[in-house]
Image (cartoon, rainbow, N blue to C red):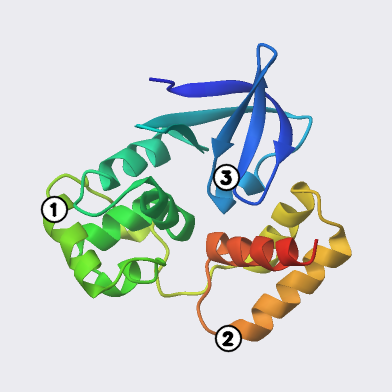
Amino acid sequence: MIASVRGEVTTVGPDGVVVEVGGVGIAVHCTPATLGGLRVGSPARLATSLVVREDSLTLYGFASDDERTLFELLQTASGVGPRLALAVLAVHSPDAIRLAIAGADHAALTRVPGIGKKGAERLVLELRDRIGSVDPIAVPNLAAPGAGWQPAVREGLTGLGWAPKEAEDAVAVIAADAEGKPIEVAVALRRAIQLLGRNR
């Protein structure tokens, strides 16, 4: 198993990066939050999980070992593959995921694209005893707007190569669409990348 990669980031795209390791460019799929912390030309270390299929080898990368652990644990639940597990981590932090599953917070889980009510119930049923514990005080209210999400998203977008004006315009569109409703940094960043990607 490839547990981690370390090297220079040569390419950053909407859903992944290429990290050059020993002269070999390795493609790694990442969440928007992880992508937001990477810069072309800068060194990076990603915790990774290799998913082997009959016709493919796909490497998924994370900013922390904890995210990788949750990614792999989520896939032990019925009906959860790597793409859905990555989507969960794109919407919630590891601690927020633990809190949602341990507390049977179906509303938080169904905010993940691809997870409906039955899927949320299945996650709680199958993972509740294995998800680990978390201090609720240490996790922001899952229904609350992410404090300062706009600066974080602007920084993430400019780090991915978009111009400050493009980043500002995307943030403005997302803020208008949200109409004051709760929004997390990872979710907003993913929407912004999708929006700007259509304009390229």
Residue 161 in the figure: left or right of residue 135: right
Q: Quadrant of the N terminus?
A: top left
* Tag 3 near tag 1, CB within 8 Å: no
Q: Looking at the image, can residue 148 be seen?
A: no
* Tag 1 near tag 2, CB within 8 Å: no
Tag 1: amino acid: Glu
> In x, y percent, where is residue 133?
22, 48
Tell me which label, 2 or 3, sits earlier in the chain: 3
> In x, y percent, where is residue 86?
43, 50
Q: Mark 1: which secondary structure?
A: helix
Residue 184 in the figure: left or right of residue 75: right
Q: Mark 3: which secondary structure?
A: helix
Quarter of the rendering containing residue 147: bottom right
Tell me which label, 3 or 1, sits earlier in the chain: 3
Q: Residues within 10 Å of mark 2 (few under 14, many from 20)?
A: few
Count the marks: 3
Going 66% across and 76% down the picture, which residue do you hit? 174
Q: Mark 2: which secondary structure?
A: loop
Tag 3: amino acid: Thr
Going 35% across and 32% down the picture, which residue do you hit? 54
> In x, y percent, where is residue 156?
70, 53
Please give the residue where the numbered disc 1 appears in the rendered image: 126
Tell which tag, 2 or 3, sits nearer the viewer.
3
Q: Residues within 10 Å of mark 1 (few under 14, many from 20)?
A: some
Please give the residue where the numbered disc 2 appears in the rendered image: 180
What whole-number distance in Å separates the C-alpha atoms at marks 3 and 1?
27 Å
